[in-house]
């Protein structure tokens, strides 16, 4: 069963082994179509961030959900039985990454900005249109602002009109000329692998 839309979405950082597995699984289910094994993808995902991208901040969107197994029946003192509620589990609905790496050579240290790059925002297909991406983005923005970030940047494919509208509702716009005067857009596109996509930015402070 899908969780109720009124159930709060909890956005948490990736920290435990279970979190790493959940991150890999939501990406695997949405991205992988080439026969790669799930276990291999899990190992590669954790290894990538621990060895090559340790400064990236990863987030999971989760909801509490009753498990689908039949209601447990517990023995009572008179040898009868009574129904107990199905156990509650946390299900992963989506994930996102907040990264400094794409901007390493694109925004000089002398720029009067502190920017981070939002990438790999993914929602499990079973939980779309339930506010998952919005919850992830709100948490990312709060975290980024708390550590002194002034701007967030991201790319969207030209043909992805729904994503363009979505980010527009969150206040993301084409970068200002002032920001572009410091930003090496070509370098950013090369690092992010997003050549030909639309660059959007949001000022946090």
Image: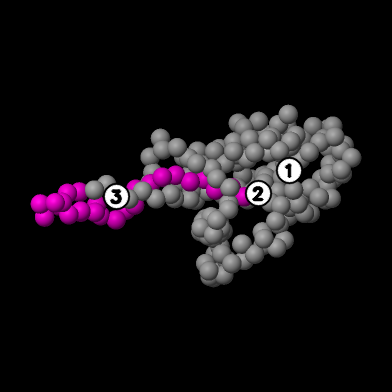
> What colouring style does the render use?
one colour
Disc 1 versus disc 3: nearer the observer: 3
Could you tell me which residue is drawn at 74 percent across and 37 percent down?
149
Crowd band around label 3 with a 10 angstrom C-alpha radius: few (<14), some (14–19), many (20+): some
Magenta residue check for 62: yes
Q: Position of residue 176 (x, y in %)?
A: 79, 32
Can you name the residue that lies furthest to the right here? 110
Provide the residue designation for mark 1: 116
Instruction: Say if 39 sits above or below 143 in the image.
Output: below
Which of pointers 2 and 1 indicates the residue nearer the eye?
2
Q: Earlier in the sequence, mark 2 or mark 3?
A: 2
Residue 200 in sight from this viewpoint: no
Q: Secondary structure at mark 3?
A: loop
Q: Residue at x 62, y 50 (%)?
A: 58
The answer to which of 189 and 140 lies nearer the viewer is 140
Span highlighted in magenta in the image = 58-83
Disc 1 secondary structure class? strand
Label 2: which secondary element: strand
Q: CA distance from mark 2 to mark 3?
A: 34 Å
Mark identifier at residue 57? 2
Looking at the image, is mark 1 or mark 3 earlier in the sequence?
3
Q: Position of residue 34 (x, y in %)?
A: 56, 68
Disc 2/disc 1 C-alpha distance (Å): 10 Å
In the rendered view, would you say 200 is above or below 87?
above
Q: Which residue is mark 3?
A: 86
Which quadrant, please, contains the C terminus? top right
Tell me which label, 2 or 1, sits earlier in the chain: 2
């Amino acid at each position: 069963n899908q969780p109720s839309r009124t159930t709060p979405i909890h956005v948490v950082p990736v920290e435990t082994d279970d979190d790493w597995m959940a991150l890999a699984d939501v990406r695997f289910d949405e991205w992988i179509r080439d026969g790669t094994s799930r276990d291999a993808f899990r190992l590669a995902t954790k290894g990538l961030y621990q060895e090559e991208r340790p400064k990236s901040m990863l987030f999971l969107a989760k909801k509490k959900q009753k498990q689908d197994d039949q209601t447990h029946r517990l023995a009572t003192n008179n040898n009868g039985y009574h129904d107990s509620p199905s156990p509650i589990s946390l299900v992963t609905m989506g994930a996102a990454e907040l990264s400094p790496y794409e901007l390493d050579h694109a925004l000089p240290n002398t720029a009067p900005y502190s920017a981070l790059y939002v990438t790999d925002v993914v929602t499990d297909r079973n939980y779309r249109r339930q506010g998952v991406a919005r919850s992830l983005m709100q948490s990312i923005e709060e975290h980024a602002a708390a550590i002194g970030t002034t701007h967030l940047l991201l790319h969207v494919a030209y043909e992805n009109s729904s994503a363009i509208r979505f980010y527009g509702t969150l206040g993301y716009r084409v970068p200002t000329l002032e920001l572009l005067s410091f930003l090496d857009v070509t370098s950013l596109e090369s690092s992010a692998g997003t050549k030909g996509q639309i660059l959007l930015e949001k000022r946090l402070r």
